[in-house]
Amino acid sequence: MDQDLINQFSTNKTLKPLLSTNFSSTDFIKQTLQTNSVFSTLNELSKGKEIVEECLEQVISKEYIDLFKRLLSIQNLENTNSEVQKGVNLLSQGMSDISNLLNTEHLELTNSIEKSKRLIMVIEILEILQNFVEQIRKLSKQMGKGTRELVLVSITLKEIERSFFPKKQKEEKEKTEKTEIDLNSVQYYEQSVLPDLSSLNIMKNGKQWIRKLRLNILKQADIFVRESLEENEESKLETAFTIYNNLGVFQERVKKQIAARSVYSSEKIETALNMSNVNQIINTQGERELTKFLWGRIVLLMEIIYSQFSQIWLINHILSTTHETNGNQRSLLEIYLSNNSSYSSFSNQNNTEKNVNQILYVFWKSLVNKVKDRLTRASNQAPQLQLVIIQNYPKLITLVHDTLEKINALAEIQGSSLKKKKEPLVDSKLLLLCFSSFENLYLSQQN
């Protein structure tokens, strides 16, 4: 640092701690950024900015940065568990400290000059956070860790957004007023200096980093939702919901998750159940091709049923664990039911929270009965199909039981919260009804 510049500011009480070799970054932020008028002239402001920029590495503890650089260079995380965990713990504490410092309840932005100086530092923080999120994603993928840290980052990002990029308010009138301005006044800095700072792309860069960081955090939260369904991991779903809530996108993101699982609409179910060409297959391709056709249809139906149940589980979990209002709960259920038009009338039920289990039970039973009805009707129209079902009955039941195991894994989580309310669970055993029409025929053949 230029010695003349140091000497020039050595008498400034606010900046003096900054010049010592062992000053506290926290104290520096509090003292420098809470002061109403750190710099009294435009010239001092520009020189002060140089000092602030030079101290950026010390604002975030150098220990955090060095550890972080080492973490990024590690290729095999599994073999360096203790080093990674040490780094994660330190970085997590750093995120927590930053969040507290950024919280406007502790540090009020008394004017736009202070806001600009803080924003310069925040951009550096955002870059570190961005890399930190990438590291968390590696931890989560390879070691199943990092969920708590990701929540901390989302809280920090929320504070940054709240402090620096609040929702636009009507301030245009003040900006357009033309008055004589004292060149040393705060008003002069706000109208003349800040546009100059903006030309340095400070605000623009900050917003870009925030957008990028927000997207990456939400992307990881979306992955947690998917993994919670695939791995029977309830904690990941809770983490994702917490992150959605922290970033103010709970309703929007959960709706998107539900819609993404509406893979099979009632129209697609109808297509999968369509067996009108059974006789044609028998007449032109023979029994072997009919068996392949039937097996493909049954596998598809099992996938449809499991997909529908996983979505039912997601909605039931949301309704039983969130603190959303009843109106919001209704809208979540309606999104699901609206994608399955045959059952959309159920969404007209009153008091959705109370009747949700009954609604979903009826939906589930209706779907299974529809599968059973179509299989029975098709086999009655084509006796060869009935024969193929009976011949392959053990394999079909094995497939049903495999599907039931996956469903029961979800049902156990679903039941854990619903049992407390002493409400009936969605009965996954109904799935066996799909083939109940053929059970007696199969047993009689065995005898």
Image (tube, rainbow, N blue to C red):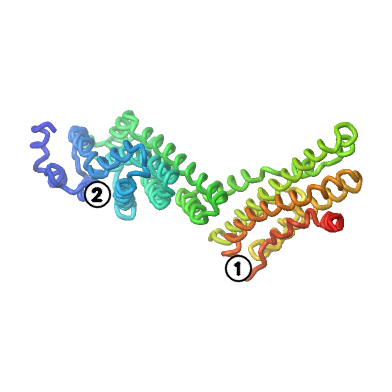
| Amino acid at pointer 1 | Lys
Instruction: State the residue in front, 108 or 154.
Output: 154
Measured in 3D between alpha carbons, the distance from the residue under mark 1 to the one under mark 2, in whole angstroms, is 52 Å
Name the residue at the front extreme.
447
Amino acid type at image mark 2? Gln
Where residue 328 sits, quadrant-wise, is bottom right
Res 118 → quadrant: top left
Q: Is residue 116 visible?
A: no
Query: In the visual, does 24 lie left or right of 133?
Result: left
Q: Dot 1: few (<14), some (14–19), or many (≥20) neighbours within 10 Å?
A: few
User: Quick one: quadrant of the N terminus?
Assistant: top left
Q: Residue 384, image x and y in percent? A: 88, 43
Q: Image point 86% across, 51% down: which residue?
A: 376
Q: Which marked residue is nearer to the observer: mark 1 or mark 2?
A: 1
> What residue sits right under mark 2 in the picture?
34
Q: Which mark is residue 432?
A: none
Kindly identify which residue carries mark 1: 419
Question: Residue 155 location in percent, x, y?
Answer: 40, 50
Name which residue lies at 83% across and 56% down: 446
Q: Secondary structure at mark 2?
A: helix
Left or right of 213, for residue 410? right
SS of the residue under disc 1: helix
Name the foreground residue: 432 vs 56.
432
Number of on-image labels:
2
Name the residue furthest top: 199
Would you place residue 294 above or below residue 199 in this image? Answer: below
N-terminal-most mark, 1 or 2: 2
